[in-house]
Image (spheres, helix red, strand yellow):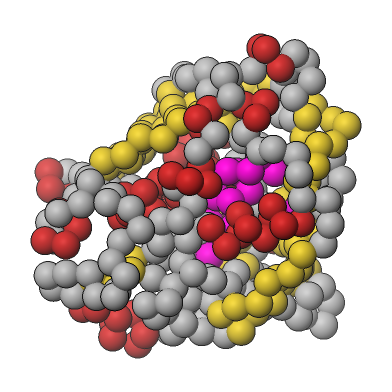
């Protein structure tokens, strides 16, 4: 049986939110089977639990934000996508996350620090079948026309594969890879995707900070690009780091489905908003998906039994 996974022991991290600039502490705890990933705002007079699901997403501007029932006026947790991406990369189904503020700390701007945290805590199998959301027919969302066109699509696939293409018309980004595909069955998430950092443009910083965004952003936790080049002294971690970060984000955004996907995901110039619209469109059509588990590991897609080693 392909089993659910959680972490073996408690682990903590402290950092700043990339948008709020506020210091936040995360405490990651093991969680029982079928509980999913749940954030708990422990800084409030009465702690509030916010389960991760497509319908608790309340904002997708600059990051993915969740709140109870998706209520924009309720307590929230924002910038959850990098941590969720790490959970997906290690095959973690159940996790309780205490947080002392409303934004997940950005750490180094990638998912690598979260992968390290989770692996340090240990990944353990649980006595319950791992449940997947298997896509049965193509679902697509499109926005804009001509040069403004962007789209995202889910299609049936025996496994989990993601392809992303960017188009920024910027010399620094155009000099790097514009399209990347990643297959989860390869087991190379940690090596090939997790270290890709978020990025931003100096021309946008003043505008964003005037809106109360990017207050915690720096070259320590983001790739910073001016009109022509990357400003970070160390350069890029991957030749195609920009588009790989978009894949990293998409993995986290798709994880809010509550179960790992069995699908082929393809996107062109997409982002958090389009990803959430795509998930909601899928879940609104009961004929477009089914929930499955694998009694025999041999029936699962190649490599999935080894997706996250039990430490």
Which residue appears at 64% of the width and 63% of the height? 67
Relative horizontal placement of residue 49, taking residue 246 as reference (left or right): right
Residue at the image point whose x is 19% and y is 58% from the top: 173
Residue 150 placement, left or right of 53: left
In the image, is residue 222 part of the stretch drawn in magenta?
no
Residue 296 pos. (x, y %): 75, 13
Image position of 16 with respect to 4: above or below: below
Observer-nearest of 209 and 11: 11
**Residue 290, position as x, y percentages in the image:** 63, 21
Residue at 75% in and 39% down? 310
Looking at the picture, tell me which residue is in the foreground, 275 or 73. 275
Does 92 lie within the magenta span? Answer: yes
Q: Which residues are magenta?
A: 79-95
Q: Classify residue 137 as left or right of residue 75.
A: left
Q: Position of residue 155 (x, y in %)?
A: 43, 24
Say which of 224 and 239 sits in front.
239
For residue 256, side relative to residue 236 (left or right): right
The correct choice, above or below, for 14 with respect to 288 in the image is below
Name the residue: 72% across, 21% down: 293
Residue 155 in sight: yes
């Amino acid at each position: 049986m392909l089993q659910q996974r959680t972490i073996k022991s408690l682990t903590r991290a402290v950092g700043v939110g990339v948008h709020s600039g506020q210091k936040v502490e995360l405490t990651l705890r093991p969680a029982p089977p079928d509980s999913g990933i749940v954030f708990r705002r422990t800084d409030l007079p009465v702690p509030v639990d916010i389960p991760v699901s497509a319908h608790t997403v309340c904002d997708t501007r600059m990051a993915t934000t969740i709140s109870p029932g998706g209520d924009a006026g309720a307590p929230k947790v924002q910038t959850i996508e990098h941590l969720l991406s790490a959970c997906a990369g290690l095959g973690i189904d159940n996790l309780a996350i205490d947080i002392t503020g409303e934004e997940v700390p950005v750490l180094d701007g990638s998912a690598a620090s979260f992968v390290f945290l989770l692996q340090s805590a240990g990944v353990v199998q649980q006595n319950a079948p791992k449940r997947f959301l298997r896509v049965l027919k193509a679902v697509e969302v499109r926005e804009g026309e001509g040069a403004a066109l962007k789209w995202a699509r889910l299609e049936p696939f025996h496994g989990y594969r993601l392809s992303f293409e960017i188009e920024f018309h910027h010399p620094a980004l155009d000099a790097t890879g514009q399209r990347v595909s990643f297959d989860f069955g390869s087991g190379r998430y940690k090596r090939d995707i997790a270290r890709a950092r978020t990025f931003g443009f100096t021309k946008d910083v003043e505008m964003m900070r005037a809106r109360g965004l990017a207050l915690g952003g720096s070259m320590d936790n983001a790739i910073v690009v001016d009109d022509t080049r990357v400003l970070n002294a160390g350069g890029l971690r991957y030749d195609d780091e920009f588009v790989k970060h978009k894949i990293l984000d998409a993995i986290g955004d798709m994880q809010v489905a509550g179960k790992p996907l069995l699908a082929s995901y393809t996107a062109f110039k997409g982002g958090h908003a389009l990803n959430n619209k795509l998930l909601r469109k899928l879940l609104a059509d009961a004929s477009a998906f089914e929930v499955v588990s694998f009694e025999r590991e041999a029936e699962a897609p190649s490599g999935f039994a080894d997706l996250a080693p039990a430490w």
